[in-house]
Amino acid sequence: MHQDKNGTLYRVREKELATKQTDNSPRIIQLRREFAEHPSRGLNPATLAAILTDAEQGNLLGQCYLAEDIEEKDGHIHAELFKRRMALTSVPFSIEPPRNASAQEKKDAANYADIFADIPDFEDVIFNMSDAILKGFSNIEYCWESYNNFRIPTAFEHRLATWFQLSQHDQSKLVLRNGTAEGEELQSFNWIQHRHASKSGYVARTGLVRQLAWPFIFKNYSVRDLAEFLEIYGIPIRIGKYPSGATTDEKNKLLQAVWSVGHNSAGIMPKGMEMEFIEAAKGGGEPFMTMMSWCERIQSKVILGQTLTAQVDSTGSQALGNVHNEVRLDIRDHDLRQIASTLNSHVLWPLHMLNGKSYNGDPRRMPRLVFDTQTPEDIKTFSEALPKLVGVGMKIPESWAHTKLMIPQPENNEPVLGVPAVAPIQSVTPEPKDKTASLRLALASLKATNSVEEPDTADLLAKQLRSKAAPVMAKLMKPIEELVQNASSLEELMQQLLELEGKLDDTELQELLQLALAAAELAGRYDVEQGD
């Protein structure tokens, strides 16, 4: 017996783990022989409403077949869905142990990470799970194999949405169709049952198919009307005129000539008969194209949340496109959170129950699959900002900077990049041009004074100057430290520091520096004289 995170007990049988449910039941095997239906043929608002109502009452068959037709027949919907689904397959993931994990829990999580990494074409599993975005649910069947005393999930196979129906007693529970009204419950530990909530509600109403079906049918009407318009008014009308008293045979020959000229641009007819070409009616297809464009914009908004990354028009701009792309990234992250929750419940936790040496039935100690949706910060911006922040006294952990920039920490004494050593170049410090430069010079002078050992020849005057400089520097640095502590962002801090320029009174500091320079010169002369 095994208990999942919700406290449900499962009896695991080795035979069931090693085989798939759909390979055993004769009633379910017949699902493989079913031919697809196409409810989109002759679809109109009345039949569409009936399909959606049947789905709400538990019969998902028509709605699932309609979803397949919509994705196949509408190229725009297929392209937008493909964008959203493919964006999920390239995001890296990791298996994280629980908080304050023990050594065994960390070891188990590392083993599970290796198992997931070895699953062939695991990206296809994620892609097939995302089929639930359109239909509301997606089920993938798999079985287990034994390898080195480990039970490993394998043979993942996506099952068509038309194989399932809603339970008569629970609108949120899916069961396999087996020819009965009740259906057959899904076997534990052998299914990834992914429910993708594009909107709140029970499973029959959460898929995007219900939002996309209406613009799909309106767009089809516009395409059909545009084709009829071009067929009727886009080609000149040909009229044949026969003289009075013409026989039936002569009329048939004239009709044949009219058809022949229309299709072959050549033909013959009896002498005395006439053929006239009448110009097509003035008009255009703009109203139909406008309707089709409106439908496609609605489809893009439903699938991607915006339109500027899907199509370009006169109102587009790069700035708006970037904003809309961020909206699409939010949708991607939302999709990945739902997929991660399903993989945790239906793959990782069963894997932990069957193999984990640290497994104790406590759902709080379960490992988790986590997608890394964080985007690295701009390295150039950070390389300029961090030295300035550190220079004003901020204490920034190295691990935080590595995490923000997504730069891994070195392991096992591996070589790291470094800056080549450069011989110091002596230079003359220019005369400060303003009070801010004087402040920077004072800070540098004090730092050098505190970091170098006091010469044996230093006299009492130098000691007194250093003792007097400490309160002066503390007074100058106090407003700067307050700005650093209260700043909410780097931009705000830099702006406040600029506003502080010219407001600090460094008169007393200048006097101390003059005395310090004089004392240093006297001490140097004293050392020279002693050396002589």
Image (cartoon, grey):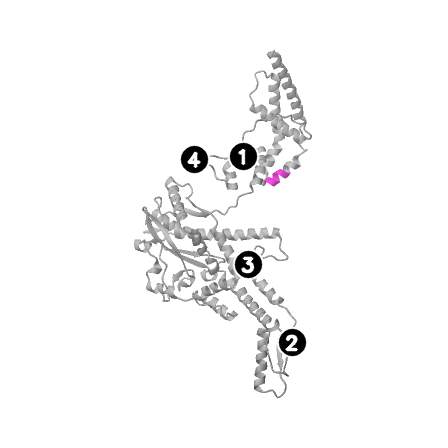
State the residue position of label 4: 412
Instruction: Residue at the far top: name it.
Output: 532
Residue type at mark 1: give it: Lys
* Mark 3 and mark 4: Cα distance apart in space: 49 Å
Q: Which residues are magenta?
A: 490-495
Q: Do tag 2 and tag 1 residues touch (Cβ < 8 Å)?
A: no
Residue 170: x percent and y percent? Answer: 41, 62
Residue 452, compared with residue 379, is above or below; it is above
Q: Residue at x 45, y 65 (%)?
A: 65
Q: Do tag 3 and tag 4 residues touch (Cβ < 8 Å)?
A: no
Residue 224 lies in quadrant: bottom right
Say which label, 3 or 2, has the lower sequence index.
2
State the residue position of label 1: 395
Say which label, 3 or 4, has the lower sequence index.
3
* Mark 2 and mark 4: Cα distance apart in space: 86 Å
Residue 54: x percent and y percent? Answer: 45, 67
Residue type at mark 3: give it: Ser
* Mark 4 and mark 1: Cα distance apart in space: 26 Å
> Camera-side residue: 328 or 494?
328
* Mark 2 and mark 1: Cα distance apart in space: 86 Å
* Mark 3 and mark 1: Cα distance apart in space: 46 Å
Say which label, 4 or 1, has the lower sequence index.
1
Say which label, 3 or 1, has the lower sequence index.
3
State the residue position of label 3: 300
